[in-house]
Image: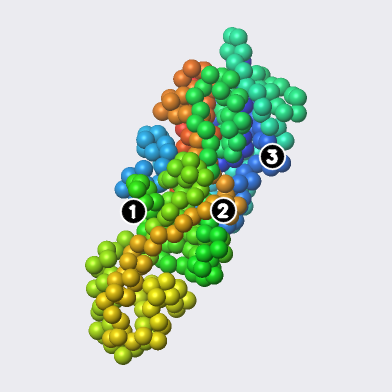
Amino acid sequence: MSRPFIAVIGGGAAGSMAAIEIKRRLPHARVAVYEAGRRLLAKVSVTGGGRCNLTNSFSGVSSMEQVYPRGARLMKRLFRQFSHTDAYAWFEREGVQLVTQDDQCVFPRSQNAMEIVDTLMGLLRRLDVEIATGCRMDGLMPVSGGGYRIHFAAGTEVLADVVVVTTGGSPKDAGLDMFRRLSLAVEPPVPSLFSLCLPGHPLTGLMGTVVADTAVSIPGTRYRACGPLLVTHWGLSGPAMLKLSSHAARLLHERAYRTPVIVNWMGGVSEEAVADELSRLAASHPHKLVHSIFPLCFNSRLWAYFLQQARIAPETRWNGLDRKSLNRLVALLTGQQLQVDGKNRFKEEFVTCGGVALSNVDSSTLECRRLPGLYFAGEVLDVDAVTGGFNLQAAWTMGYVVGRSVGERG
């Protein structure tokens, strides 16, 4: 029997999972991972602040569209083969103890991303998967009679029977040209998962302030997100803003990251409900100063900011607050409009939307429809997610599915 050669291009989460599952199913095959960087799984080692948010419990996720702005239908289909519960079980079988936080993010109990890296690297070595670093692919062509010629930037070439492309997201459109040369449809890449800037805005003076339950939206669009909001020295971040940036990635790119954003600081509660809450505060503390009694979801610094923006003197007593001032305060709390100008990369993570269009691949196997023996997995495809472990889960799922598909192909 001839020994097939399977080349995995990209040594991130999806590529490592694919290589492991291929080798498990085809132990006689030669499997090699080619990584452009100096080491495999570099991005995994820093995700989750170095703790590795490797998946999510999906509790409270009612539809894939909530967490996968692009690729939701594909992920729903692929989850039938390898879901978040399968990923949880997969890692625990390999000896990694996991813990689910209150926010439903799943981490290794050790809180150390290197445990995930070491586990995957150990599997690759034990399975005798070849590893080559410093190998950036810059050309891929089918060979007459079957297989593919892979050209690397250093000038070397290899011939492989099967190629699995897991090169990750390309921040520049030119990075997708090699796939265009194969006549594959591509979606131009744009950044996703970032915070937004408010240059010179007084809010930035409150950096470090967190409001646990907010709703943010872009007026005149369907884009809206809920969750904690963090005030930074450059603008707004936190889960709510990151979700909004992910869902509205293309729109924000088209607008050059200059757009109005509306913040409901009370978590989407209506003006009427907020007015009632403040009226109850006034009735319970009529002689207290407005700066000293306020909703528990705010700190004193942020409340002082709201009073200033609503033109209410902090020495005003609750029983002396007139209706117009109360209305201004309610309108501010439930629908403050802020003018965004610019974006800021989210910590060490960099996610793009765009890539190889999903129309190119079989939705059950991730094999290229036009080019048999060529597979895609991970962020190189036009699939991306909101923060919370969903991007890594997509990588595990797609890597596993490709490994299984290649194994069944033989």
Task: From the top left corner, tell me how far across and down residue 185 is, in percent.
Answer: 49, 24
> Is residue 63 positioned above or below 310 on the image?
above
Along the viewing direction, whichever of 261 and 380 lies nearer the viewer: 261
The amino acid sitting under disc 1 is Gly
* Rendered residue at 57%/24% (across/down): 179
Q: Is residue 6 above or below residue 285?
A: above
Which of the two discs, 2 and 3, sits closer to the camera? 2
The numbered mark, 3 or 1, whose residue comes first in the sequence reads 3
Which residue has dot 2 on it?
Answer: 344
Q: Amino acid at mark 3?
A: Gly
Instruction: Name the quadrant containing residue 268.
Output: bottom left
Q: Position of residue 141 (x, y in %)?
A: 62, 18
Marks 1 and 2: in contact by CB < 8 Å? no
User: Number of numbered discs present?
Assistant: 3
**In the image, farthest residue toward the bottom:** 287
Query: Which residue, as the protein is rendered here, is positioned at the far top?
Result: 145
**Spatial separation of the CA atoms under disc 2 and disc 3:** 24 Å
Callout 1 crowding tier (Cα within 10 Å): few <14, some 14–19, many ≥20: few
List the residue tagged with mark 1.
60
Q: Depth check: 39 or 243 in front?
A: 243
- Please name the residue shown 59% across and 9% down the image: 145
The disc placed on residue 294 is: none
> Residue 153: horizontal and vertical position, in percent?
72, 28
Q: Which residue is mark 3?
A: 37
If you read the primary sequence from the N terminus, does the residue marked by circle 2 or circle 3 appear first?
3
Could you tell me which secondary element the residue under label 1 belongs to?
A: loop
Is residue 229 among what the camera can see?
Answer: yes
Which one is closest to the eye, mark 2 or mark 1?
Answer: 2
Q: On the picture, is 386 further left or further right than 220?
A: right
Name which of mark 2 and mark 1 comes first in the sequence: 1
Residue 221 location, x and y as percent? 35, 46
- What is the spatial separation of the Cα atoms under label 2 and label 1, in whole angstroms? 28 Å
